[in-house]
């Protein structure tokens, strides 16, 4: 969402959690796009989990719409209000992170020249998890069937069949 309350939604696979004691997440904008511009304008953003059930809509929101067009509505997705930040989350997504922007790092190449990559970091201030995916007090991530981009036009879907556990040494 920007200062005019225009809502913006797009898939970002360059996304990760980067700190544990505080929940800090990042996404990287490959070029200066609306999402990073809106985040810097309002200092808030929301990450809604992309899932198998939402795959068509996730892809639809990557269309290069002009600013002011609400990609969430265009993709047929309903918003749901957040609690601590103004931008909405995707109602149909089983998990969403309410984030407050911390900083953006402009990346440089080996010669020290700036490249058009903008990595935004945000602190998670609120977490939404659909109660249907809490089992015995734990989040059943596999049941949400999250999807991951695999390059080309390919994706992976995480399911309970592909889940495995390892104890750390
Ligand atoms: C699955 C998927 C993942 C994507 N991940 C990224 C990403 O990590 N960074 C990026 O800059 N663009 C990514 N894109 C492209 C953006 O979603 C696309 O440029 C979109 O129009 C940006 O919207 P915005 O201008 O509203 O931010 C991805 C597209 C798809 C389909």
Image (cartoon, rainbow, N blue to C red):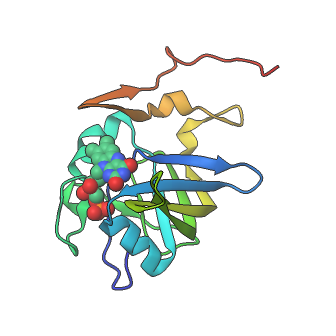
Q: Nearer the viewer, residue 141 or 17?
A: 17
User: Residue pushed farthest right?
Assistant: 169
**What x and y, as percent, mark residue 73?**
23, 62
Q: How many marks?
A: 0
Quarter location, residue 6? bottom left
- Assign the N terminus to one quadrant of the image: bottom left
**What x and y, as percent, mark residue 4?**
33, 85
Vertical position of residue 145 compared to residue 21: above or below: above
Q: Residue at x 24, y 61 (%)?
A: 71
- Assign the C terminus to one quadrant of the image: top right
Q: Nearer the viewer, residue 115 or 81?
A: 115
Quarter location, residue 157? top left
User: Residue pushed farthest front?
Assistant: 111
**What x and y, as percent, mark residue 82?**
51, 67
- In the drawing, does residue 137 fall left or right of residue 98? right
Q: Nearer the viewer, residue 32 or 164?
A: 32
Q: Residue at x 38, y 74 (%)?
A: 38
Q: Is residue 28 visible?
A: yes
Vertical position of residue 102 compared to residue 42: above or below: above
Q: Residue at x 46, y 26 (%)?
A: 158
Q: Is residue 11 visible?
A: no
Vertical position of residue 44 compared to residue 164: above or below: below
- In the drawing, does residue 29 fall left or right of residue 112? left
- In the drawing, does residue 10 fall left or right of residue 163? left
Q: Residue at x 31, y 59 (%)?
A: 78
């Amino acid at each position: 969402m920007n200062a005019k309350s225009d809502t913006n939604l797009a898939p970002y696979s360059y996304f990760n959690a980067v700190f544990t004691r505080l929940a800090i997440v990042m996404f990287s904008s490959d070029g200066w796009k609306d999402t990073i511009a809106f985040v810097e304008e309002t200092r808030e953003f929301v990450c809604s989990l992309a899932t198998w059930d939402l795959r068509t809509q996730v892809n639809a929101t990557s269309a290069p719409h002009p600013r002011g067009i609400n990609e969430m509505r265009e993709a047929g997705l309903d918003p749901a209000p957040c609690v601590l930040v103004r931008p909405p989350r995707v109602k149909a997504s089983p998990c969403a992170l309410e984030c407050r922007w911390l900083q953006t790092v402009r990346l440089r190449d080996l010669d020290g020249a700036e490249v058009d990559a903008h990595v935004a970091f945000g602190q998670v201030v609120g977490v939404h998890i659909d109660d249907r995916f809490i089992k015995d007090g734990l989040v059943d991530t596999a049941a949400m069937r999250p999807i991951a981009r695999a390059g080309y036009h390919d994706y992976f879907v995480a399911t309970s069949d592909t889940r495995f556990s390892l104890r750390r040494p």
